[in-house]
Image: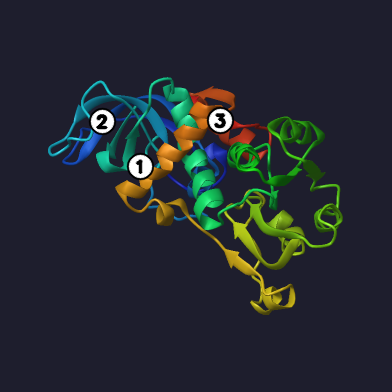
Amino acid sequence: MKAIQFETTGGPEVLGVVEIPAPIAGPGQVLVRQQAIGINFIDTYHRSGLYPVKLPSRLGMEGAGVVEAVGDGVTRFKAGDLIAYASGPLGAYAEYHAVAADRAVALPAGVSAQVGAAAMLKGMTAEFLIRRCYPVKAGETILVHAAAGGVGSILVQWAKHIGATVIATAGSAEKAERATSLGADHVILYRDEDVAAQVREITGGAGVPVAYDSVGAATFEGTLKSLARRGLFVSFGNASGPVPPFAPARLQQSGSLFFTRPTMGDYLATTAELDESAAALFGVIASGAVKIDIGQTFKLEEAQRAHQALEGRETVGASLLIP
């Protein structure tokens, strides 16, 4: 089978196409014949070395397709089922992938493999951020950075479904228009405008109780200064580079703030949590409250180009590799 592999860490150019034997489904695993593969920023962190992995390494944590075979002890799925997963192991950038059955979910009727692969990691990230990391309530005003991106676009729609007012940021006028079309009440161009000043003006000086920041270094200061007293800074990505080290006293001085750097694994640690999160996600998709926009697709062999587009902030919505 074809798969994407890298021998050394670095830029997109380290990604190569290799021919390797297809895996087999071991005990507790299912073998997935991939129909769509999710492309996520965490993939670039593995490739660059920001999140260290053992080399040589394959890449990708999210995909969807048909169960080709089941391993010993698997009763959750059978051959022919359409499933999706977003918890790894690394190796989703391939024609076939063996994954743990208890870390995958069945796709409900009406949800295609492409939507499943586009929705799982980003959508369940949005779910735990907006329902459990900080349970957003109707009437609250929140800040969502990178609102035209994969997770951001879902956060905006879900927050509006709950009844919140959304202040969104975007990196370009085109992406600002997209954020508005998703339902954002206010949009700030974070590269050109003073985010904190705009947030304070919109909120009458109060600031927001929660800010969701996947951009990282470029937006850190603006996010910190946008929070209300006892507000929560949710840092869940490093698109512009990691957040710089800061003294805890800054949280005290800025209004007894809270800061968290969550990972999906800690919010979906059990199969029950996975199923609950996926059910909530598929529920808002089925209701029409959240639409999954697949902004661009690439052939599996175009993984380099896909990473260039993602890191170059050229993408909107979700991006997929198609084997």
Residue 153, image x and y in percent?
Answer: 63, 37
* Residue type indicated by callout 1: Asp
* Whole-percent x, y for residue 276 in the image: 38, 44
Q: Are marks 2 and 1 in contact (CB under 8 Å)?
A: no
Residue occupying the point 63% across, 37% down: 157
| Label 2, residues with CA under 10 Å away: few <14, some 14-19, many ≥20 | many
Q: Name the residue under label 1.
A: 275
Labels 1 and 3: the sequence-earlier one:
1
Residue 3 seen anywhere in this rendered image of the structure: no
The label nearer to you, 2 versus 1, is 1
Disc 2 from disc 1: Cα separation: 20 Å
- 177 and 157: which one is in front? 157
Residue 207 location in percent, x, y? Answer: 77, 60
The answer to whether 59 is drawn above or below residue 46 in the figure is: above
The residue at 64%/53% (across/down) is 212
Q: Is residue 75 left or right of residue 161?
A: left
The amino acid at mark 3 is Ser
Q: Tell me the tag on residue 88.
A: none
Q: Which sits in the foreground, 180 or 42?
A: 180
User: Element at badge 2?
Assistant: strand
In which quadrant of the rendered image does the N terminus lie? top left
Residue 25 is left or right of residue 288, and the answer is left
According to the image, label 3 marks what residue?
Answer: 319
Give the residue furthest to the left. Answer: 72
Q: From the image, tell me which residue sits under label 2.
A: 31
The amino acid at mark 2 is: Leu
Of residues 304 and 106, the one nearer the viewer is 106
Q: Which quarter of the figure has residue 93?
A: top left
The vertical placement of 207 against 45, above or below, is: below
Q: Of discs 1 and 3, which sits in the foreground?
A: 1
